[in-house]
Image: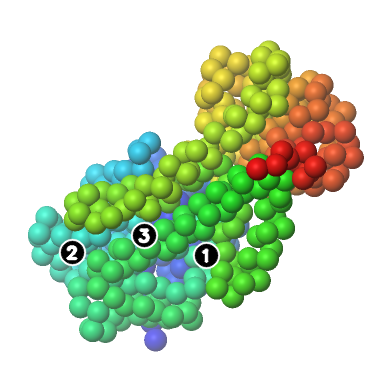
Amino acid sequence: MTKPVLAFCGLTHLCLCSGVAAAEKGFSVILFDPDPARVAAVSEGRLPVVEPDLDALFRRNRARLRVTHDPAELRAADLVYLAPDVPTDDHGLSDLGPIDALLRVVKPAMAKGATLVLLSQLPPGFTRGLPGRFGRFDGPLHYQVETLIFGRAMQRALEPERFIVGCFDPAQPLPDALRDFLAAFACPILPMRLESAELAKISINMCLVASISVANTLAELCEKLGADWSEISASLRLDRRIGPHAYLSPGLGLAGGNLERDLATLVQLGATHATDTRLVSAAIENSAHRKSWAWQTLRARLLDRQPDAAIAVLGLAYKENTHSTKNSPALALIAQMPGRAIRVHDPVVPATAAGPHAVPTIDPLDCVTGADAVLLMTPWPAYRELDPAALARRMRGRLLIDPYRVIDPKAAIAAGLEHVTLGVGSPASEVPPC
């Protein structure tokens, strides 16, 4: 049986990872973007995103990948995915303009009868409304829930847990090209009505937000009561009702844009349809509250008594294994200290992302040299290899603020550092009675 030819349109994170995964599964793939400069860079292997294994898989499958800015080449595709990243503003609201603009280029270029699938994250009702705004489609139109996680995108693209496919009529069989492509991944396929699929993605993220908010709320109590959240979370992971893969690690508020987008969408939907979304608003408030943890800790532990202290920040990306700084806790921290010459280091993100006063450094040890306080704001794997004793020798002060417990606390204390991390309070003997 001849495999369908696939096209993925919009050369951003989602599109590239999804297209390369399809090529890895043996499909011929067209990677399309109307921007000639972006196409030229990708054609030369200069990918605009950082993702583990993406570059290696792109090179390995280069013979199956046709990169083009010519929409006429989409006529060769049996199955076309519209898959650009959807940007969000500082309030988590999506800008859907680029989706419409790309669709105006892609729709007329497709072969008659070819299947179009929207893979980008879209609000409920968007897909069903397309024929009314763009006219009749010459082939099947579907929405598919994307599974991208920054830093694990290729793993998720190659090993999906399930496919959620939105359909105008879920009772009808999927188009042959879409069915044959999804079957190559040997995982469950869940057809459902369009609005259900669009809301399913938001529902998944809302459950993750709930777990994160619980972890943040209780971790903060641990810091006040002398408890250790890592001890408690270990017991929760052994509870069948919660499980080993639950999002139970405390953090510095929501970041990256996707979760924030879904919370903003739910608040909007609640206002439009007069439903109760106070739970969503509480999660937004909890996120904002926890974003200040690093700044408040730095002030209380050092800056209130030593305002001119030298500060070093390790990590600018919002999480490890990604170039994204969307709502980055590190950048939010640095923004609290305008004009201060802060030494910074990140394996991927340039120092310019931290503002004009950030001082770039060549490696982590160079970054911490002479610092009174070091804040380890992104849990990059390379930072886990840092020797606390080497950090202590390079630092002038002793304060190591390590929210994600990248450095082993016992080793840090043994090196003479004051190690502060999320969810860990002072010993019980130091905690005043309630």
Could you say whether the residue bearing mark 2 is in a helix, strand or loop?
loop
- Of the residues under marks 3 and 1, which one precedes in the sequence? 1
Q: Can residue 236 be seen by looking at this rendering?
A: yes
Q: Find residue 153 and report its horizontal and vertical position in percent.
A: 52, 58
Alpha carbon distance from label 3 to label 1 = 17 Å
Mark sitting earlier along the chain (2/3): 2
Check disc 3 and report the residue beneath it.
202
Q: At 70% across and 16% down in the image, what residue appears?
A: 305
Contact (Cβ within 8 Å) of mark 1 with mark 2: no
Which mark identifies residue 156? 1
Crowding around mark 1 (Cα neighbors within 10 Å: few <14, some 14 to 19, many 20+) is some
- The quarter of the picture where residue 14 lies is bottom left
**Amino acid type shown at disc 3:** Ile
Q: Amino acid at mark 1?
A: Arg
Asked if residue 382 shows in the view, the reply is no
Residue type at mark 2? Arg
Q: Which residue is mark 2?
A: 128
Find the distance from the CA under tag 1 to the CA under tag 2. Answer: 27 Å
Q: Residues within 10 Å of mark 3 (few under 14, many from 20)?
A: many
Is 45 placed left or right of 104 in the picture? Answer: right
Secondary structure under badge 3?
helix
Q: Label 2, label 3: how many angstroms apart (C-alpha)? A: 17 Å
Image coordinates for residue 52, horizontal then vertical, percent: 60, 54
